[in-house]
Image: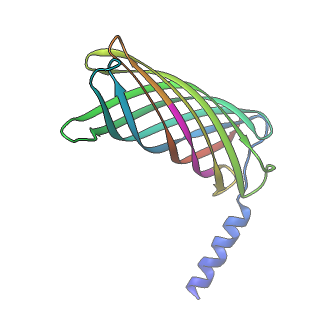
Amino acid sequence: MKKLIISYLLILFCLAANSQITKGYWLIGGSGKFHSFNQKFEVAPGNANTDFNYTDIELSPSVGYFVKDRLAFGIRPTFSSRKGENVGGGIRTDMYRFWIGPFSRYYFLKPGKQFNILTEISYQIGVSNIWGDKNKLEKFSTMVGPVVYLNNSVGLEFLLGYSSNLEEIEGIVMSSNKGVLFGIGIQVHLKK
């Protein structure tokens, strides 16, 4: 009997959940991303080149505003911790990076649904200090996936996407990487 009551309450809770993705709402939240990729460093043509395997964990708070129903624009700072090891072993590295930049989101289904599908595009620039030098960072990413609304204001996202990153360590190395992203995020939709 207890399981039946809990199931009934859960069904009622889910049926009451919907999204607030209409003009005039704020989007506040964040996400975490796990990114595993290979990176090739080219110091200079014909010189010592090396390949690394990296694991990158990012935390990104975000603030956006729905300018139209289902369309939001905002800004997102990002903190990244990257750990890596070269393919042959022996060289390990830990790096920390900071980015900031705009994002846009579009929700495909109409407002008021418990479930929706969203797509997001973002571009960020940033800096980090590795080997005592200032680095220039650029990042472009696009993601798509479902969002499930736990109530009329809170949504849980499961996103899959693509990322392209460029990094220049002043006067020493230029590196780039491209790869698949998986992200889990939570967003809160608030009326202005």
Q: Where is 82 relative to 44, above or below?
A: below
Image coordinates for residue 4, horizontal then vertical, percent: 62, 84
Image coordinates for residue 143, horizontal then vertical, percent: 61, 42
Q: Residue at x 47, y 31 (%)?
A: 78
Q: Residue at x 30, y 31 (%)?
A: 50
Q: Where is 134 relative to 14, above or below?
A: above
Q: Nearer the viewer, residue 27 or 118?
A: 118
Q: Residue at x 70, y 51 (%)?
A: 117
Image coordinates for residue 74, horizontal then vertical, percent: 64, 29
Is 95 magenta? The answer is no
Q: Nearer the viewer, residue 106 or 153?
A: 106
Residue lying farthest top?
A: 171
- The residue segment tinted magenta is 155-164
Q: How many marks?
A: 0
Quadrant (top left, top right, bottom left, bottom right) of the C terminus: top right
Q: Which is the main secondary structure of the residues drawn in magenta?
A: strand
* Left or right of 161 on screen, residue 86: left
* Left or right of 16 on screen, residue 36: left
Is 162 magenta? The answer is yes
Q: Residue at x 73, y 55 (%)?
A: 18
* Left or right of 108 on screen, residue 130: left
Residue lying farthest bottom?
A: 1
Residue lying farthest front?
A: 46
Residue lying farthest left?
A: 90
* Left or right of 71 on screen, residue 34: left
Q: Nearer the viewer, residue 50 or 125?
A: 50
Image coordinates for residue 149, horizontal then vertical, percent: 66, 55
